[in-house]
Amino acid sequence: MSEEEKKEQHIKMPKEQGWLERTFEGALWQTRFFVLLAVIFSMLGGIALFIVASVDIWAVVTLVFNTYVQHLHPEHFHEEIVSGLIGAVDLYLMAIVMFIFGFGLYELFISEIDVAKGGASRILEIHSLDQLKDKLAKVIVMVLVVSFFKRVLHTPYEGALEMLYFAGSILALSVGLYFLHKGGEH
Protein backbone atom coordinates (compact mmCIF):
# COMPACT_ATOMS: atom_id res chain seq x y z
CA MET A 1 0.00 0.00 0.00
CA SER A 2 1.52 3.31 -1.02
CA GLU A 3 1.74 6.41 1.16
CA GLU A 4 -1.03 8.04 -0.84
CA GLU A 5 -3.39 5.07 -0.40
CA LYS A 6 -2.81 5.11 3.35
CA LYS A 7 -3.64 8.82 3.50
CA GLU A 8 -6.81 8.17 1.54
CA GLN A 9 -7.85 5.57 4.10
CA HIS A 10 -7.07 7.99 6.95
CA ILE A 11 -4.39 5.77 8.44
CA LYS A 12 -1.89 7.78 10.42
CA MET A 13 1.69 6.90 9.86
CA PRO A 14 3.86 6.76 13.01
CA LYS A 15 5.60 9.96 11.92
CA GLU A 16 2.26 11.74 11.77
CA GLN A 17 1.30 10.76 15.31
CA GLY A 18 2.11 13.08 18.12
CA TRP A 19 4.34 12.02 20.97
CA LEU A 20 1.42 11.81 23.43
CA GLU A 21 -0.76 9.75 21.08
CA ARG A 22 2.09 7.35 20.27
CA THR A 23 2.94 6.93 23.98
CA PHE A 24 -0.69 6.40 24.97
CA GLU A 25 -1.32 3.85 22.21
CA GLY A 26 1.88 2.01 23.11
CA ALA A 27 0.87 1.83 26.77
CA LEU A 28 -2.65 0.81 25.79
CA TRP A 29 -1.30 -2.00 23.62
CA GLN A 30 0.93 -3.26 26.44
CA THR A 31 -2.07 -3.66 28.78
CA ARG A 32 -2.99 -6.77 26.80
CA PHE A 33 -0.37 -8.56 28.89
CA PHE A 34 -2.79 -8.46 31.86
CA VAL A 35 -4.50 -11.32 30.02
CA LEU A 36 -1.53 -13.41 31.15
CA LEU A 37 -3.07 -13.42 34.64
CA ALA A 38 -6.15 -15.19 33.27
CA VAL A 39 -3.96 -17.53 31.22
CA ILE A 40 -1.73 -18.49 34.15
CA PHE A 41 -4.58 -18.99 36.60
CA SER A 42 -6.62 -20.92 34.04
CA MET A 43 -3.71 -23.30 33.62
CA LEU A 44 -3.26 -23.60 37.40
CA GLY A 45 -7.00 -24.23 37.81
CA GLY A 46 -6.88 -26.88 35.09
CA ILE A 47 -3.89 -28.57 36.68
CA ALA A 48 -5.64 -28.52 40.08
CA LEU A 49 -8.74 -30.12 38.55
CA PHE A 50 -6.62 -32.82 36.87
CA ILE A 51 -4.97 -33.60 40.20
CA VAL A 52 -8.27 -33.75 42.11
CA ALA A 53 -9.90 -35.95 39.45
CA SER A 54 -6.90 -38.28 39.44
CA VAL A 55 -6.98 -38.57 43.23
CA ASP A 56 -10.71 -39.34 43.01
CA ILE A 57 -10.04 -42.12 40.50
CA TRP A 58 -7.27 -43.46 42.70
CA ALA A 59 -9.76 -43.57 45.59
CA VAL A 60 -12.20 -45.56 43.43
CA VAL A 61 -9.44 -47.97 42.37
CA THR A 62 -8.33 -48.55 45.97
CA LEU A 63 -11.97 -49.01 47.04
CA VAL A 64 -12.47 -51.68 44.37
CA PHE A 65 -9.18 -53.38 45.24
CA ASN A 66 -9.91 -53.44 48.99
CA THR A 67 -13.47 -54.60 48.43
CA TYR A 68 -12.40 -57.59 46.34
CA VAL A 69 -9.36 -58.46 48.46
CA GLN A 70 -11.48 -58.49 51.64
CA HIS A 71 -14.34 -60.34 49.87
CA LEU A 72 -16.83 -57.65 50.86
CA HIS A 73 -20.19 -57.14 49.17
CA PRO A 74 -21.28 -53.58 50.04
CA GLU A 75 -24.73 -52.36 49.07
CA HIS A 76 -24.79 -50.01 46.05
CA PHE A 77 -21.16 -50.85 45.30
CA HIS A 78 -21.49 -50.51 41.51
CA GLU A 79 -23.35 -47.21 41.79
CA GLU A 80 -20.60 -45.79 44.01
CA ILE A 81 -17.89 -46.83 41.57
CA VAL A 82 -19.68 -45.45 38.53
CA SER A 83 -20.58 -42.26 40.37
CA GLY A 84 -16.98 -41.72 41.47
CA LEU A 85 -15.65 -42.28 37.97
CA ILE A 86 -18.27 -40.04 36.37
CA GLY A 87 -17.43 -37.34 38.90
CA ALA A 88 -13.78 -37.60 37.91
CA VAL A 89 -14.64 -37.41 34.20
CA ASP A 90 -16.66 -34.28 35.01
CA LEU A 91 -13.62 -32.73 36.67
CA TYR A 92 -11.38 -33.70 33.76
CA LEU A 93 -13.78 -32.02 31.34
CA MET A 94 -13.81 -28.87 33.46
CA ALA A 95 -10.00 -28.94 33.45
CA ILE A 96 -10.12 -29.11 29.66
CA VAL A 97 -12.42 -26.07 29.65
CA MET A 98 -9.82 -24.20 31.70
CA PHE A 99 -7.02 -25.23 29.32
CA ILE A 100 -8.94 -24.30 26.19
CA PHE A 101 -9.85 -20.96 27.76
CA GLY A 102 -6.25 -20.22 28.75
CA PHE A 103 -4.75 -21.26 25.41
CA GLY A 104 -7.44 -19.33 23.54
CA LEU A 105 -6.84 -16.13 25.48
CA TYR A 106 -3.12 -16.43 24.95
CA GLU A 107 -3.47 -16.94 21.20
CA LEU A 108 -6.02 -14.16 20.83
CA PHE A 109 -4.30 -11.47 22.90
CA ILE A 110 -0.61 -12.31 23.21
CA SER A 111 0.83 -14.51 20.46
CA GLU A 112 0.34 -17.70 18.53
CA ILE A 113 1.87 -20.70 20.26
CA ASP A 114 4.67 -21.61 17.88
CA VAL A 115 5.48 -24.94 19.55
CA ALA A 116 1.95 -26.18 18.82
CA LYS A 117 2.17 -25.51 15.08
CA GLY A 118 3.85 -28.83 14.32
CA GLY A 119 1.36 -30.89 16.34
CA ALA A 120 -1.35 -33.02 14.82
CA SER A 121 -4.14 -31.68 17.02
CA ARG A 122 -5.77 -28.40 16.13
CA ILE A 123 -8.10 -28.37 19.12
CA LEU A 124 -6.15 -25.65 20.88
CA GLU A 125 -5.75 -23.44 17.81
CA ILE A 126 -8.04 -20.45 18.24
CA HIS A 127 -8.18 -17.56 15.80
CA SER A 128 -11.26 -15.61 16.95
CA LEU A 129 -13.36 -15.00 20.00
CA ASP A 130 -16.28 -16.79 18.35
CA GLN A 131 -14.13 -19.87 17.78
CA LEU A 132 -13.10 -19.80 21.46
CA LYS A 133 -16.74 -19.52 22.56
CA ASP A 134 -17.77 -22.40 20.29
CA LYS A 135 -15.07 -24.71 21.63
CA LEU A 136 -15.86 -23.80 25.22
CA ALA A 137 -19.59 -24.25 24.67
CA LYS A 138 -19.13 -27.76 23.28
CA VAL A 139 -17.01 -28.88 26.22
CA ILE A 140 -19.33 -27.22 28.73
CA VAL A 141 -22.31 -29.03 27.18
CA MET A 142 -20.41 -32.30 27.61
CA VAL A 143 -19.79 -31.38 31.27
CA LEU A 144 -23.53 -30.87 31.67
CA VAL A 145 -24.26 -34.22 30.01
CA VAL A 146 -21.87 -35.99 32.38
CA SER A 147 -23.38 -34.16 35.37
CA PHE A 148 -26.85 -35.17 34.21
CA PHE A 149 -25.73 -38.79 33.95
CA LYS A 150 -24.26 -38.65 37.46
CA ARG A 151 -27.49 -37.28 38.90
CA VAL A 152 -29.59 -39.85 37.06
CA LEU A 153 -27.65 -42.64 38.79
CA HIS A 154 -28.87 -41.48 42.19
CA THR A 155 -32.47 -40.68 41.25
CA PRO A 156 -35.12 -43.11 42.46
CA TYR A 157 -37.95 -43.82 40.01
CA GLU A 158 -41.23 -44.71 41.64
CA GLY A 159 -43.69 -44.68 38.78
CA ALA A 160 -44.29 -44.87 35.06
CA LEU A 161 -44.59 -41.07 34.74
CA GLU A 162 -41.13 -40.54 36.25
CA MET A 163 -39.69 -43.12 33.86
CA LEU A 164 -41.38 -41.30 30.98
CA TYR A 165 -39.79 -38.02 32.14
CA PHE A 166 -36.44 -39.80 32.32
CA ALA A 167 -36.82 -41.13 28.77
CA GLY A 168 -37.90 -37.69 27.55
CA SER A 169 -34.89 -36.02 29.14
CA ILE A 170 -32.56 -38.52 27.47
CA LEU A 171 -34.28 -37.89 24.14
CA ALA A 172 -33.98 -34.11 24.57
CA LEU A 173 -30.32 -34.47 25.51
CA SER A 174 -29.64 -36.69 22.48
CA VAL A 175 -31.39 -34.29 20.09
CA GLY A 176 -29.48 -31.38 21.56
CA LEU A 177 -26.14 -33.19 21.15
CA TYR A 178 -27.04 -34.13 17.58
CA PHE A 179 -27.69 -30.51 16.63
CA LEU A 180 -24.63 -29.32 18.54
CA HIS A 181 -22.35 -31.60 16.55
CA LYS A 182 -24.21 -31.46 13.25
CA GLY A 183 -21.97 -29.70 10.79
CA GLY A 184 -19.14 -29.47 13.33
CA GLU A 185 -15.63 -30.75 12.77
CA HIS A 186 -14.69 -33.93 14.66
Image (cartoon, grey):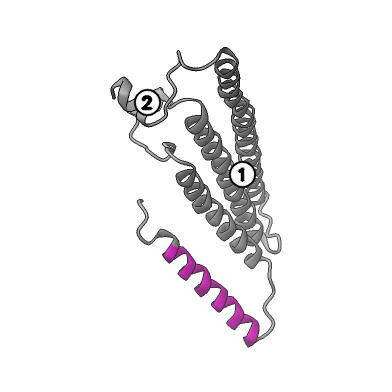
| Residue 150 drawn above or below residue 132 | below
Picture quarter with the N terminus = top left
Residue 7 lies in what quarter of the image?
A: top left
Q: Position of residue 33 (x, y in %)?
A: 59, 23
> Circle 1 sits in a helix, a strand or a loop, which is it?
helix
The residue positioned farthest toward the bottom in the image shown: 160
Q: Position of residue 118 (x, y in %)?
A: 33, 27
Q: Nearer the viewer, residue 55 or 32?
A: 32
Residue 99 lies in what quarter of the image?
A: top right
The alpha-carbon separation of the residues under discs 2 and 1 comes to 63 Å
Marks 2 and 1 close (CB-CB < 8 Å): no
Q: Position of residue 38 (x, y in %)?
A: 63, 32
Q: Nearer the viewer, residue 143 or 135?
A: 135
* Residue shown at 46% from the left, 63% from the top: 177
Crowdedness of circle 2 by 10 Å Cα count: few (<14), some, many (20+)? few
Q: Position of residue 171 (x, y in %)?
A: 50, 74
Q: Nearer the viewer, residue 2 or 162?
A: 2
Tell me: 17 left or right of 50: left
The verdict on residue 172 being magenta is yes
Q: Nearer the viewer, mark 2 or mark 1?
A: 2
* Residue shown at 68% from the left, 63% from the top: 76
Query: Considering only order in the chain, which callout, 1 or 2, is on the residue closer to the N terminus?
Result: 2
| Residue 9 drawn above or below residue 160 | above
Amino acid at circle 1: Ile
Amino acid at circle 2: Lys
Question: Which residue, given by chain and number where applicable, does mark 1 sit on?
Answer: 57
Crowdedness of circle 1 by 10 Å Cα count: few (<14), some, many (20+)? some
The region drawn magenta spans 160-179
* Residue shown at 55% from the left, 39% from the top: 101
Question: Which residue, given by chain and number where applicable, does mark 2 sit on?
Answer: 7
> Circle 2 sits in a helix, a strand or a loop, which is it?
helix
